[in-house]
Amino acid sequence: MKHRNSWSLEDAVLELSDPARITAGIVLLTVVGIESGGFFLLKVFGGRMVTTDLQKSFFRAGHAHAGVLVILGLLCLLLSEATSLTGFAHWLAATGVLYAAILMPAGFFFSAMGEGRTRPNRAVVLLPVGAAVLAAGVGTLAVGLLLG
């Protein structure tokens, strides 16, 4: 006897809309860029690039945020397909985290650029903007999932 919330592999069908499928494909290609960021970090931490402590910490944070937010963004994209959200709310739920995956790493990297930089430049404003987009995206998705 099956319980109400049980499922089997035979019951599992993942159907993505064309926009979600295409977005997921494009986002997966960005992993190559994130991977090259890892190579850059090897040069930074291997001493082959002269960087300040701020630059080291911001470059590390930018790389980490990119990787984690891309994974979370793909999950949100998939989960948004299970909601009844429409229009802007669906778009935000599906892609908000993915936009944050651009904004926040950009804030870390761009604000630390420049020889000998010990304080972030104005590009640091991308961090709270990205955080707001992240919160709006996951919050909208959570409401959409809870409402059905």
Image (cartoon, grey):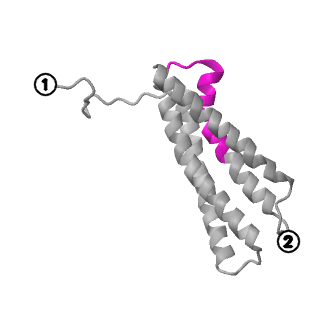
Q: Are marks 2 and 1 in contact (CB under 8 Å)?
A: no
Magenta stretch: residue 37 in it? Answer: no
Residue 81 position in % (x across, y down): 49, 27
Structural distance between the alpha carbons of marks 2 and 1: 67 Å
Assign the C terminus to one quadrant of the image: top left
Magenta-colored segment: predominant secondary structure = helix
What residue do we see at 85% from left, 66% from top? Answer: 114
> Mark 1: which amino acid?
Met
Q: Residue furthest bottom?
A: 47
Q: Which residue is mark 2?
A: 115
Residue 36 position in % (x across, y down): 63, 63
Q: Quadrant of residue 44?
A: bottom right
What residue do we see at 65% from left, 22% from top? Answer: 88
Q: Secondary structure at mark 1?
A: loop
What residue do we see at 59% from left, 56% from top? Answer: 32
What residue do we see at 58% from left, 47% from top? Answer: 69
Is residue 139 toward the left or the right of residue 7 in the image? right
Magenta part of the protein: which range?
Answer: 84-101
Q: Which residue is mark 1?
A: 1
